[in-house]
Amino acid sequence: MSQHTRVRAQPKVHDSPQEERLAVRKLDSYLMPLLVAGFFVLQVDRSNISNALTDTLTADLGISNSDVNLGSQLMSAGIVVAEIPSNLILQRVGAPVWLTLQMGVWGTIALTQSWCTNIHSFLATRFLLGIWEGGYIPGGQYMLALFYTREDLALRTAIFYFGNYSATAVGSLLAAGILNLGGTSGLAGWQWLFIIEGAITLLVFFAFIAFLPRSPSHTASVHGLFDFFTPRQREILRARIIADDETKGADKAEITLKSLLKALTDYRLWVHILLNIVALSPKGGLQLYGPNIIKSLGFSRTNANLLNATRRRGPWSIVAFAWSIVFAGVLYGLPAGSDKWARYAIFTLLSGGNALAQGLNGAWVGINAVSPSKRSIGLAMAVMGSNLGAIAGGQLFWDDDAPRYNRAFMAILVLYAGAIAVAAMTMCVYWRENRVMARGEELKINGQVIEAPGDGKRRFDM
Protein backbone atom coordinates (compact mmCIF):
# COMPACT_ATOMS: atom_id res chain seq x y z
CA MET A 1 0.00 0.00 0.00
CA SER A 2 1.62 3.26 -1.10
CA GLN A 3 -0.50 5.60 0.98
CA HIS A 4 -1.14 5.66 4.69
CA THR A 5 -4.31 3.83 5.64
CA ARG A 6 -5.40 6.47 8.12
CA VAL A 7 -8.70 6.97 9.89
CA ARG A 8 -9.09 10.72 10.05
CA ALA A 9 -9.63 12.42 13.39
CA GLN A 10 -13.25 12.56 14.43
CA PRO A 11 -15.08 14.21 17.30
CA LYS A 12 -14.92 12.18 20.47
CA VAL A 13 -17.61 9.53 20.70
CA HIS A 14 -20.07 10.37 23.47
CA ASP A 15 -19.51 7.22 25.47
CA SER A 16 -19.89 6.74 29.18
CA PRO A 17 -16.75 6.11 31.26
CA GLN A 18 -18.13 2.66 31.98
CA GLU A 19 -18.44 1.85 28.26
CA GLU A 20 -14.87 2.96 27.68
CA ARG A 21 -13.58 0.93 30.64
CA LEU A 22 -15.36 -2.19 29.36
CA ALA A 23 -13.96 -1.73 25.85
CA VAL A 24 -10.41 -1.27 27.15
CA ARG A 25 -10.82 -4.21 29.51
CA LYS A 26 -11.86 -6.44 26.61
CA LEU A 27 -8.87 -5.19 24.62
CA ASP A 28 -6.63 -6.05 27.57
CA SER A 29 -8.10 -9.55 27.74
CA TYR A 30 -7.38 -10.31 24.05
CA LEU A 31 -4.33 -8.30 23.03
CA MET A 32 -2.16 -8.32 26.16
CA PRO A 33 -2.10 -12.10 26.85
CA LEU A 34 -1.17 -12.78 23.23
CA LEU A 35 1.68 -10.25 23.08
CA VAL A 36 2.99 -11.38 26.48
CA ALA A 37 2.82 -15.04 25.40
CA GLY A 38 4.68 -14.14 22.20
CA PHE A 39 7.44 -12.41 24.18
CA PHE A 40 7.54 -15.40 26.55
CA VAL A 41 8.14 -17.99 23.81
CA LEU A 42 10.57 -15.68 22.01
CA GLN A 43 12.71 -15.41 25.13
CA VAL A 44 12.44 -19.14 25.88
CA ASP A 45 13.55 -20.05 22.35
CA ARG A 46 16.32 -17.46 22.47
CA SER A 47 17.74 -18.42 25.87
CA ASN A 48 17.14 -22.16 26.24
CA ILE A 49 20.63 -22.72 24.84
CA SER A 50 21.87 -21.79 28.34
CA ASN A 51 19.85 -24.68 29.79
CA ALA A 52 21.00 -27.05 27.03
CA LEU A 53 24.60 -26.29 28.01
CA THR A 54 24.01 -28.01 31.37
CA ASP A 55 23.18 -31.21 29.44
CA THR A 56 25.30 -33.02 26.84
CA LEU A 57 24.90 -30.51 23.98
CA THR A 58 28.57 -29.56 23.65
CA ALA A 59 29.77 -33.17 23.84
CA ASP A 60 27.13 -34.46 21.39
CA LEU A 61 27.87 -31.77 18.80
CA GLY A 62 31.62 -31.70 19.41
CA ILE A 63 31.66 -27.97 20.17
CA SER A 64 33.35 -25.81 22.82
CA ASN A 65 32.26 -22.80 24.87
CA SER A 66 33.94 -20.63 22.23
CA ASP A 67 31.67 -22.17 19.59
CA VAL A 68 28.66 -21.52 21.82
CA ASN A 69 29.79 -17.89 22.14
CA LEU A 70 30.00 -17.69 18.35
CA GLY A 71 26.49 -19.14 18.00
CA SER A 72 25.17 -16.59 20.49
CA GLN A 73 26.88 -13.78 18.59
CA LEU A 74 25.47 -14.99 15.26
CA MET A 75 21.96 -15.06 16.68
CA SER A 76 22.36 -11.54 18.04
CA ALA A 77 23.84 -10.41 14.73
CA GLY A 78 20.83 -11.89 12.93
CA ILE A 79 18.50 -9.93 15.19
CA VAL A 80 20.45 -6.71 14.60
CA VAL A 81 20.41 -7.22 10.82
CA ALA A 82 16.67 -7.96 10.79
CA GLU A 83 15.34 -5.26 13.13
CA ILE A 84 14.83 -2.34 10.74
CA PRO A 85 13.90 -4.42 7.63
CA SER A 86 11.39 -6.30 9.78
CA ASN A 87 9.79 -3.06 10.91
CA LEU A 88 9.68 -1.73 7.34
CA ILE A 89 7.75 -4.87 6.33
CA LEU A 90 5.56 -4.54 9.42
CA GLN A 91 4.54 -1.03 8.40
CA ARG A 92 3.67 -2.21 4.88
CA VAL A 93 1.66 -5.40 5.60
CA GLY A 94 0.41 -4.60 9.10
CA ALA A 95 1.85 -5.59 12.47
CA PRO A 96 -0.50 -8.55 13.20
CA VAL A 97 0.17 -10.25 9.85
CA TRP A 98 3.94 -9.88 10.08
CA LEU A 99 4.28 -10.79 13.78
CA THR A 100 2.16 -13.91 13.23
CA LEU A 101 4.25 -15.01 10.23
CA GLN A 102 7.48 -14.38 12.14
CA MET A 103 6.37 -16.53 15.03
CA GLY A 104 5.41 -19.45 12.81
CA VAL A 105 8.83 -19.45 11.13
CA TRP A 106 10.97 -18.96 14.24
CA GLY A 107 8.95 -21.62 16.12
CA THR A 108 9.71 -24.10 13.35
CA ILE A 109 13.43 -23.20 13.43
CA ALA A 110 13.49 -23.48 17.24
CA LEU A 111 12.05 -26.99 17.02
CA THR A 112 14.47 -28.11 14.28
CA GLN A 113 17.45 -27.24 16.52
CA SER A 114 16.86 -30.71 17.95
CA TRP A 115 18.21 -32.13 14.65
CA CYS A 116 21.61 -30.41 14.94
CA THR A 117 24.51 -32.84 14.61
CA ASN A 118 27.60 -30.62 14.33
CA ILE A 119 28.88 -27.07 14.62
CA HIS A 120 27.64 -26.12 11.14
CA SER A 121 23.99 -26.96 11.77
CA PHE A 122 24.24 -25.40 15.24
CA LEU A 123 25.55 -22.07 13.92
CA ALA A 124 23.09 -22.03 10.99
CA THR A 125 20.01 -22.55 13.17
CA ARG A 126 21.16 -19.94 15.72
CA PHE A 127 21.63 -17.34 12.96
CA LEU A 128 18.27 -18.13 11.31
CA LEU A 129 16.55 -18.00 14.68
CA GLY A 130 17.94 -14.49 15.19
CA ILE A 131 16.86 -13.35 11.71
CA TRP A 132 13.25 -14.42 12.27
CA GLU A 133 12.99 -13.29 15.89
CA GLY A 134 14.34 -9.87 14.93
CA GLY A 135 11.59 -7.28 14.99
CA TYR A 136 9.13 -8.99 17.35
CA ILE A 137 9.96 -6.85 20.41
CA PRO A 138 9.66 -3.44 18.68
CA GLY A 139 6.74 -4.84 16.68
CA GLY A 140 4.94 -5.80 19.87
CA GLN A 141 5.62 -2.37 21.34
CA TYR A 142 4.34 -0.80 18.13
CA MET A 143 1.12 -2.82 18.51
CA LEU A 144 0.71 -1.47 22.04
CA ALA A 145 1.18 2.10 20.81
CA LEU A 146 -1.37 1.45 18.05
CA PHE A 147 -4.10 0.36 20.48
CA TYR A 148 -3.37 2.32 23.66
CA THR A 149 -3.13 5.99 24.61
CA ARG A 150 0.06 7.51 26.00
CA GLU A 151 -1.52 7.41 29.44
CA ASP A 152 -2.10 3.65 29.08
CA LEU A 153 1.18 2.80 27.42
CA ALA A 154 3.70 2.67 30.28
CA LEU A 155 1.74 0.08 32.27
CA ARG A 156 1.04 -2.07 29.19
CA THR A 157 4.70 -1.95 28.19
CA ALA A 158 5.66 -3.17 31.66
CA ILE A 159 3.14 -6.01 31.35
CA PHE A 160 4.50 -6.83 27.88
CA TYR A 161 8.00 -7.20 29.32
CA PHE A 162 6.62 -9.55 31.97
CA GLY A 163 6.69 -12.15 29.18
CA ASN A 164 10.46 -11.66 28.96
CA TYR A 165 11.11 -11.75 32.70
CA SER A 166 8.80 -14.70 33.39
CA ALA A 167 10.45 -16.70 30.60
CA THR A 168 13.78 -16.36 32.40
CA ALA A 169 12.28 -18.09 35.43
CA VAL A 170 9.69 -20.44 33.93
CA GLY A 171 12.02 -21.45 31.09
CA SER A 172 14.53 -22.77 33.59
CA LEU A 173 11.78 -24.58 35.51
CA LEU A 174 10.63 -26.23 32.28
CA ALA A 175 14.20 -27.13 31.39
CA ALA A 176 14.81 -28.75 34.77
CA GLY A 177 12.04 -31.24 34.04
CA ILE A 178 12.46 -31.64 30.28
CA LEU A 179 16.19 -32.41 30.46
CA ASN A 180 15.36 -35.43 32.61
CA LEU A 181 13.71 -36.96 29.51
CA GLY A 182 17.21 -37.65 28.17
CA GLY A 183 17.37 -41.20 26.80
CA THR A 184 13.64 -41.38 26.03
CA SER A 185 13.10 -42.56 22.42
CA GLY A 186 16.85 -42.37 21.92
CA LEU A 187 16.96 -38.57 22.20
CA ALA A 188 19.18 -36.50 24.49
CA GLY A 189 17.67 -34.16 27.06
CA TRP A 190 18.68 -31.06 25.07
CA GLN A 191 16.88 -32.45 21.99
CA TRP A 192 13.67 -32.87 23.96
CA LEU A 193 14.15 -29.31 25.25
CA PHE A 194 14.19 -27.84 21.74
CA ILE A 195 11.32 -30.07 20.53
CA ILE A 196 8.93 -29.30 23.38
CA GLU A 197 9.68 -25.59 23.67
CA GLY A 198 9.53 -25.15 19.89
CA ALA A 199 6.13 -26.87 19.88
CA ILE A 200 4.90 -24.46 22.58
CA THR A 201 5.88 -21.56 20.29
CA LEU A 202 3.83 -23.05 17.47
CA LEU A 203 0.81 -23.30 19.79
CA VAL A 204 1.11 -19.56 20.49
CA PHE A 205 1.43 -19.00 16.73
CA PHE A 206 -1.97 -20.65 16.16
CA ALA A 207 -3.44 -18.50 18.96
CA PHE A 208 -2.16 -15.40 17.12
CA ILE A 209 -3.92 -16.54 13.95
CA ALA A 210 -7.18 -17.05 15.83
CA PHE A 211 -7.34 -14.06 18.16
CA LEU A 212 -4.84 -11.22 17.50
CA PRO A 213 -6.77 -8.02 16.54
CA ARG A 214 -5.44 -5.91 13.66
CA SER A 215 -6.17 -2.33 14.75
CA PRO A 216 -8.71 -0.31 16.77
CA SER A 217 -10.71 0.16 13.56
CA HIS A 218 -10.45 -3.48 12.43
CA THR A 219 -10.49 -5.69 15.52
CA ALA A 220 -10.97 -8.99 13.67
CA SER A 221 -7.87 -11.20 13.63
CA VAL A 222 -5.77 -11.85 10.53
CA HIS A 223 -8.16 -14.48 9.11
CA GLY A 224 -11.06 -11.98 9.27
CA LEU A 225 -13.67 -14.69 9.87
CA PHE A 226 -14.99 -13.41 13.18
CA ASP A 227 -14.61 -10.45 15.53
CA PHE A 228 -14.90 -10.49 19.32
CA PHE A 229 -15.60 -6.74 19.51
CA THR A 230 -18.96 -5.08 18.85
CA PRO A 231 -19.25 -2.15 16.40
CA ARG A 232 -19.82 0.16 19.39
CA GLN A 233 -16.62 -1.05 21.09
CA ARG A 234 -14.63 -0.56 17.88
CA GLU A 235 -16.00 2.98 17.64
CA ILE A 236 -14.94 3.71 21.22
CA LEU A 237 -11.45 2.24 20.79
CA ARG A 238 -10.92 4.12 17.52
CA ALA A 239 -12.14 7.45 18.90
CA ARG A 240 -10.05 7.35 22.08
CA ILE A 241 -6.84 6.46 20.25
CA ILE A 242 -7.32 9.14 17.56
CA ALA A 243 -8.14 11.73 20.22
CA ASP A 244 -4.81 10.85 21.83
CA ASP A 245 -2.82 10.88 18.55
CA GLU A 246 -4.48 10.94 15.12
CA THR A 247 -1.45 9.32 13.46
CA LYS A 248 -2.38 6.11 15.27
CA GLY A 249 -5.51 5.64 13.19
CA ALA A 250 -3.60 3.57 10.62
CA ASP A 251 -3.37 -0.20 10.60
CA LYS A 252 -0.85 -0.09 7.72
CA ALA A 253 1.62 2.55 6.63
CA GLU A 254 4.69 2.96 4.50
CA ILE A 255 7.96 4.27 5.89
CA THR A 256 9.50 6.44 3.19
CA LEU A 257 13.22 6.93 2.66
CA LYS A 258 12.81 10.48 3.97
CA SER A 259 11.17 9.36 7.22
CA LEU A 260 13.78 6.61 7.64
CA LEU A 261 16.64 9.08 7.23
CA LYS A 262 14.93 11.52 9.56
CA ALA A 263 14.77 8.87 12.27
CA LEU A 264 18.32 7.65 11.69
CA THR A 265 19.71 11.19 12.04
CA ASP A 266 17.90 11.82 15.34
CA TYR A 267 20.74 11.76 17.88
CA ARG A 268 18.31 11.01 20.72
CA LEU A 269 17.66 7.54 19.28
CA TRP A 270 21.40 6.87 19.15
CA VAL A 271 21.67 7.77 22.83
CA HIS A 272 19.04 5.11 23.57
CA ILE A 273 21.00 2.59 21.47
CA LEU A 274 24.15 3.39 23.45
CA LEU A 275 22.25 2.96 26.72
CA ASN A 276 21.07 -0.51 25.71
CA ILE A 277 24.51 -1.58 24.46
CA VAL A 278 26.22 -0.62 27.71
CA ALA A 279 23.43 -1.70 30.06
CA LEU A 280 22.64 -5.05 28.45
CA SER A 281 26.14 -6.36 27.78
CA PRO A 282 26.26 -7.81 31.33
CA LYS A 283 22.80 -9.30 30.90
CA GLY A 284 23.86 -11.06 27.69
CA GLY A 285 26.70 -12.89 29.41
CA LEU A 286 24.82 -13.62 32.63
CA GLN A 287 21.81 -14.95 30.72
CA LEU A 288 23.87 -17.22 28.47
CA TYR A 289 26.03 -18.67 31.22
CA GLY A 290 23.74 -18.25 34.26
CA PRO A 291 22.91 -21.96 34.71
CA ASN A 292 26.54 -22.97 34.10
CA ILE A 293 27.78 -20.38 36.62
CA ILE A 294 25.35 -21.76 39.21
CA LYS A 295 26.35 -25.32 38.33
CA SER A 296 30.02 -24.38 38.86
CA LEU A 297 29.17 -23.40 42.45
CA GLY A 298 28.63 -27.09 43.20
CA PHE A 299 24.95 -27.69 42.35
CA SER A 300 23.69 -30.58 40.20
CA ARG A 301 22.40 -30.01 36.64
CA THR A 302 18.74 -30.16 37.69
CA ASN A 303 19.28 -27.90 40.71
CA ALA A 304 21.25 -25.43 38.58
CA ASN A 305 18.30 -25.01 36.22
CA LEU A 306 15.77 -24.86 39.07
CA LEU A 307 17.80 -22.24 40.94
CA ASN A 308 18.30 -20.22 37.76
CA ALA A 309 14.48 -19.79 37.65
CA THR A 310 14.34 -17.67 40.79
CA ARG A 311 15.51 -14.22 39.01
CA ARG A 312 9.99 8.71 35.95
CA ARG A 313 12.22 5.71 33.37
CA GLY A 314 15.50 7.64 33.64
CA PRO A 315 15.83 7.71 37.45
CA TRP A 316 14.54 4.14 37.76
CA SER A 317 17.11 3.01 35.20
CA ILE A 318 19.84 4.55 37.33
CA VAL A 319 18.45 2.85 40.45
CA ALA A 320 18.48 -0.52 38.63
CA PHE A 321 22.08 -0.03 37.46
CA ALA A 322 23.21 1.05 40.93
CA TRP A 323 21.57 -2.07 42.39
CA SER A 324 23.50 -4.23 39.90
CA ILE A 325 26.80 -2.49 40.67
CA VAL A 326 26.43 -3.25 44.37
CA PHE A 327 25.86 -6.97 43.90
CA ALA A 328 28.37 -7.39 41.05
CA GLY A 329 30.92 -5.78 43.37
CA VAL A 330 30.03 -8.08 46.25
CA LEU A 331 30.23 -11.15 44.00
CA TYR A 332 33.60 -10.00 42.66
CA GLY A 333 34.95 -9.44 46.17
CA LEU A 334 33.87 -12.74 47.74
CA PRO A 335 36.89 -14.87 48.64
CA ALA A 336 37.45 -18.28 47.08
CA GLY A 337 35.67 -21.04 48.95
CA SER A 338 32.73 -18.86 50.00
CA ASP A 339 29.49 -20.68 50.76
CA LYS A 340 27.78 -21.67 47.52
CA TRP A 341 24.34 -20.57 48.78
CA ALA A 342 25.69 -17.11 49.62
CA ARG A 343 27.18 -16.78 46.12
CA TYR A 344 23.92 -18.02 44.58
CA ALA A 345 21.86 -15.49 46.56
CA ILE A 346 24.07 -12.62 45.43
CA PHE A 347 23.98 -13.83 41.81
CA THR A 348 20.16 -13.87 41.95
CA LEU A 349 20.04 -10.32 43.35
CA LEU A 350 22.41 -9.17 40.59
CA SER A 351 20.14 -10.74 37.95
CA GLY A 352 17.11 -8.95 39.41
CA GLY A 353 18.65 -5.55 38.69
CA ASN A 354 19.67 -6.22 35.10
CA ALA A 355 16.16 -7.40 34.18
CA LEU A 356 14.75 -3.86 34.20
CA ALA A 357 16.90 -1.96 31.74
CA GLN A 358 15.48 -2.96 28.35
CA GLY A 359 11.82 -2.49 29.32
CA LEU A 360 12.47 0.94 30.81
CA ASN A 361 14.44 2.10 27.78
CA GLY A 362 11.86 0.72 25.33
CA ALA A 363 9.03 2.55 27.08
CA TRP A 364 11.19 5.69 27.10
CA VAL A 365 11.63 5.54 23.31
CA GLY A 366 7.98 4.71 22.59
CA ILE A 367 6.49 7.45 24.75
CA ASN A 368 8.79 10.16 23.38
CA ALA A 369 8.29 9.27 19.69
CA VAL A 370 6.34 11.91 17.78
CA SER A 371 5.28 9.86 14.73
CA PRO A 372 4.51 6.22 13.87
CA SER A 373 7.59 5.94 11.65
CA LYS A 374 9.92 7.33 14.30
CA ARG A 375 8.31 5.11 16.93
CA SER A 376 8.70 1.99 14.79
CA ILE A 377 12.29 2.73 13.73
CA GLY A 378 13.27 4.00 17.18
CA LEU A 379 12.02 0.86 18.92
CA ALA A 380 13.83 -1.29 16.35
CA MET A 381 17.06 0.66 16.90
CA ALA A 382 16.76 0.28 20.68
CA VAL A 383 16.42 -3.49 20.32
CA MET A 384 19.40 -3.47 17.94
CA GLY A 385 21.36 -1.86 20.76
CA SER A 386 20.21 -4.60 23.12
CA ASN A 387 21.51 -7.28 20.79
CA LEU A 388 24.78 -5.51 20.12
CA GLY A 389 25.14 -5.57 23.89
CA ALA A 390 24.35 -9.29 23.88
CA ILE A 391 27.11 -9.87 21.32
CA ALA A 392 29.59 -8.13 23.60
CA GLY A 393 28.16 -9.86 26.67
CA GLY A 394 28.75 -13.27 25.13
CA GLN A 395 32.49 -12.56 25.32
CA LEU A 396 32.59 -11.81 29.05
CA PHE A 397 32.78 -15.38 30.35
CA TRP A 398 35.68 -17.64 29.31
CA ASP A 399 36.79 -21.10 30.40
CA ASP A 400 40.12 -19.86 31.76
CA ASP A 401 38.25 -17.42 34.05
CA ALA A 402 36.08 -20.15 35.64
CA PRO A 403 34.75 -20.82 38.19
CA ARG A 404 34.91 -17.38 39.85
CA TYR A 405 34.95 -15.32 36.62
CA ASN A 406 36.79 -12.40 38.22
CA ARG A 407 37.56 -10.70 34.90
CA ALA A 408 33.93 -11.00 33.83
CA PHE A 409 32.53 -9.44 36.99
CA MET A 410 35.06 -6.60 36.90
CA ALA A 411 33.93 -5.86 33.33
CA ILE A 412 30.30 -5.95 34.51
CA LEU A 413 31.09 -3.39 37.22
CA VAL A 414 32.60 -1.03 34.64
CA LEU A 415 29.69 -1.50 32.22
CA TYR A 416 27.03 -0.72 34.82
CA ALA A 417 28.93 2.40 35.90
CA GLY A 418 28.94 3.45 32.25
CA ALA A 419 25.21 2.73 31.99
CA ILE A 420 24.52 5.14 34.85
CA ALA A 421 26.47 7.84 33.01
CA VAL A 422 24.58 7.24 29.74
CA ALA A 423 21.17 7.22 31.49
CA ALA A 424 22.03 10.52 33.17
CA MET A 425 23.13 11.95 29.81
CA THR A 426 19.83 10.83 28.22
CA MET A 427 17.87 12.58 30.97
CA CYS A 428 19.90 15.74 30.37
CA VAL A 429 19.12 15.61 26.63
CA TYR A 430 15.36 15.53 27.28
CA TRP A 431 15.60 18.12 30.06
CA ARG A 432 17.36 20.52 27.67
CA GLU A 433 14.82 19.94 24.90
CA ASN A 434 11.90 20.41 27.28
CA ARG A 435 13.36 23.82 28.12
CA VAL A 436 13.61 24.66 24.41
CA MET A 437 9.96 23.74 23.83
CA ALA A 438 8.85 25.56 26.97
CA ARG A 439 10.25 28.75 25.40
CA GLY A 440 8.12 28.11 22.28
CA GLU A 441 11.16 27.37 20.09
CA GLU A 442 11.54 24.70 17.40
CA LEU A 443 13.75 21.65 17.91
CA LYS A 444 16.18 21.14 15.02
CA ILE A 445 18.61 18.35 14.16
CA ASN A 446 21.00 18.83 11.24
CA GLY A 447 19.09 21.98 10.31
CA GLN A 448 15.72 20.19 10.05
CA VAL A 449 12.75 20.93 12.28
CA ILE A 450 12.15 17.78 14.35
CA GLU A 451 9.45 19.10 16.66
CA ALA A 452 7.69 22.44 16.55
CA PRO A 453 5.52 24.00 19.28
CA GLY A 454 2.39 23.24 17.26
CA ASP A 455 3.15 19.54 16.77
CA GLY A 456 1.17 18.60 19.86
CA LYS A 457 4.09 17.26 21.89
CA ARG A 458 3.80 18.94 25.28
CA ARG A 459 7.06 17.69 26.78
CA PHE A 460 9.43 14.76 26.62
CA ASP A 461 9.35 12.11 29.33
CA MET A 462 12.52 12.00 31.42
Image (cartoon, rainbow, N blue to C red):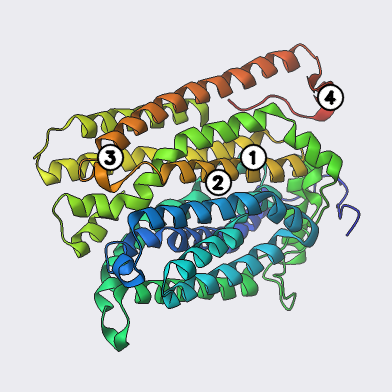
Question: Which residue is identified by label 4?
Answer: 449
Nearer to us: label 3 or label 2 = 3
Q: Which sits earlier in the primary sequence, circle 2 or circle 1?
A: 2
Residue 31 shows in this picture: no
Q: Amino acid at mark 4?
A: Val
Residue 166 place in picture, x, y as percent: 40, 55
In the shown orientation, is residue 447 left or right of residue 139? right
Q: Amino acid at mark 3?
A: Leu
Q: Residues within 10 Å of mark 1 (few under 14, many from 20)?
A: many
Nearest to the observer: residue 191 or residue 33: 191
Residue 428 place in picture, x, y as percent: 58, 17
Q: Secondary structure at mark 2?
A: helix
Q: Which mark is residue 208?
A: none
Q: Which sits earlier in the primary sequence, circle 4 or circle 3?
A: 3
Question: Which residue is identified by label 3?
Answer: 349
Q: Amino acid at mark 2?
A: Thr
Question: Which residue is identified by label 2?
Answer: 157
